[in-house]
């Protein structure tokens, strides 16, 4: 197998603000894996706060000797080798995992969900994200998304509770949508977080994601005991091995390919969640339709989905799974179901 990797910059339709940062672009690396004329595509999305860069991904990929494998069906062996090459680098590892699944599906001429025995007939609705901003900003964004039944609202603003409450009230006056709330570790104490969650429970909020710092599991467990709304772990849950510590701390987990090292571990995490009695939210970073189509192959197994990453960018270089007004139409094309746009094909080949 032969691996090539190309850095690319995604432009966001509008500045993305959450509790801890703001940005207008997301660097990615597109990966192209070739074996006997079949090409699999993968992607590493690299939001700066997660620590990986285009340089670190390229260095990681360069250190790999993927060419020593000549059977793409040996996913377990290949991906264990990739994982053991170095710690961290979860997005770089995800890029290889996605490309390998794409290749296997293309050789079998079946979409990944069929290879896993999953029907794509029923998928959860996908949320659409309203980032932190002024009240006029969030109202305008909610107006643009008026046909989307579930909105993900970013809270945890520095001004804390008063601004957070004003955002929810402004949105509640603008849209009939249900909300999910992501505090992105922004609430400073368990008491403040619980007070907010109790207040939110009166505003048609389905659940709250990551109320406190990722390591504040004892304080989160205190909220868990008292919360009227389900709590979902995002920053506290990256990989399979994190899940045991989340029992009786969170009600569910946000699984993302860029954290989990790709589809293979994400699939295992979904089944671990079921065994532990945790709900599953399938999430994403700002990504092209390459990684989004890959994640959508698992969407039928999730209770909730937050796969709006490709909708937030203006230069998507792939086509695949379509998400319109929150409905996920999982691509039936072989593999991850994504193909490069005509323009992208010229620089990918
Ligand atoms: Mg989150």
Image (spheres, rainbow, N blue to C red):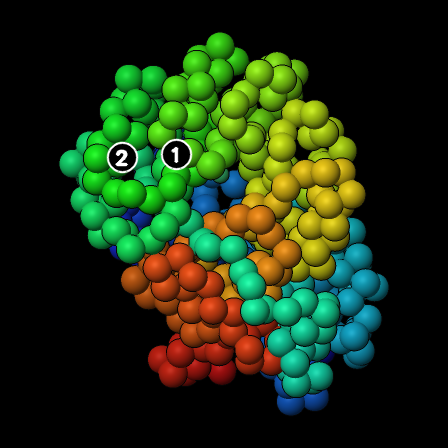
Q: Position of residue 207 (x, y in %)?
A: 49, 34
Marked residue nearer the N-terminal end (1 or 2): 2
Neighbour tally class for label 2: few under 14, some 14-19, many 20 plus, Cα within 10 Å: some
Q: Which residue is mark 2?
A: 172
Residue extending furthest top? 191
Q: Residue at x 43, y 61 (%)?
A: 327
Asked if residue 193 lies left or right of residue 16, the reply is right
Q: Position of residue 232 (x, y in %)?
A: 56, 34
Neighbour tally class for label 1: few under 14, some 14-19, many 20 plus, Cα within 10 Å: few
Classify mark 2 as within 8 Å of ligand 1 or not, answering yes or no.
Answer: no
Asked if residue 334 lies left or right of residue 21, the reply is right
Asked if residue 218 lies left or right of residue 130, the reply is right
Compared with 20, 86 (above or below) is: below
User: Would residue 106 be visible to someone looking at this image?
Assistant: yes
Residue nearer the viewer, 105 or 144: 144
Q: Which residue is mark 1?
A: 204
Residue nearer the viewer, 150 or 288: 150
Question: Which SS class for mark 1?
Answer: loop
Q: Are marks 1 and 2 in contact (CB under 8 Å)?
A: yes
Q: Residue at x 66, y 63 (%)?
A: 97
User: Would residue 262 be visible to someone looking at this image?
Assistant: no
Compared with 269, 219 (above or below) is: above
**What label sits on residue 296 in the rendered view?**
none
Q: Residue at x 62, y 37 (%)?
A: 252
């Amino acid at each position: 197998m032969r691996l090539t990797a190309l850095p690319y910059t995604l432009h966001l339709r509008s500045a993305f603000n959450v509790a801890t940062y703001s940005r207008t672009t997301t660097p990615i690396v597109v990966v192209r894996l070739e074996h006997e004329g079949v090409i699999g595509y993968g992607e590493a999305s690299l939001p700066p706060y997660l620590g990986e860069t285009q340089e670190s991904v390229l260095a990681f990929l360069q250190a790999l000797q993927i060419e020593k494998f000549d059977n793409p069906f040996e996913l377990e062996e290949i991906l264990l080798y990739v994982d053991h090459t170095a710690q961290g680098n979860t997005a770089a590892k995800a890029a290889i995992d996605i490309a390998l699944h794409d290749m296997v599906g293309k050789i079998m001429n079946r979409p990944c969900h069929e290879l896993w025995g999953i029907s794509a007939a029923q998928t959860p609705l996908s949320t659409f994200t309203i980032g932190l901003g002024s009240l006029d900003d969030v109202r305008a964004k909610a107006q643009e998304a008026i046909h989307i039944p579930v909105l993900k609202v970013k809270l945890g603003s520095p001004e804390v509770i008063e601004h957070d409450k004003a955002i929810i009230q402004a949105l509640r006056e603008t849209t009939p949508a249900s909300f999910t709330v992501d505090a992105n570790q922004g609430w400073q104490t368990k008491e403040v977080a619980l007070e907010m969650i109790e207040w939110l429970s009166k505003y048609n909020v389905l659940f709250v994601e990551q109320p406190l710092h990722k390591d504040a599991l004892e304080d989160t467990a205190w909220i868990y005991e008292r919360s009227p709304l389900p709590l979902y772990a995002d920053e506290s849950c990256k990989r399979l091995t994190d899940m045991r510590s989340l029992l009786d701390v969170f009600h569910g987990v946000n699984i993302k390919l860029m954290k989990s090292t790709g589809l293979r571990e994400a699939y295992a995490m979904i089944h671990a969640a079921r065994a532990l009695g945790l709900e599953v939210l399938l999430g994403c970073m700002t990504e092209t339709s390459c990684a989004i189509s890959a994640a959508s192959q698992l969407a039928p197994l999730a209770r909730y989905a937050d796969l709006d990453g490709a909708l937030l960018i203006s230069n998507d270089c792939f086509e695949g799974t379509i998400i319109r007004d929150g409905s996920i139409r999982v691509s039936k094309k072989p593999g991850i179901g994504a193909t490069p746009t005509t323009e992208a094909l010229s620089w990918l080949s």
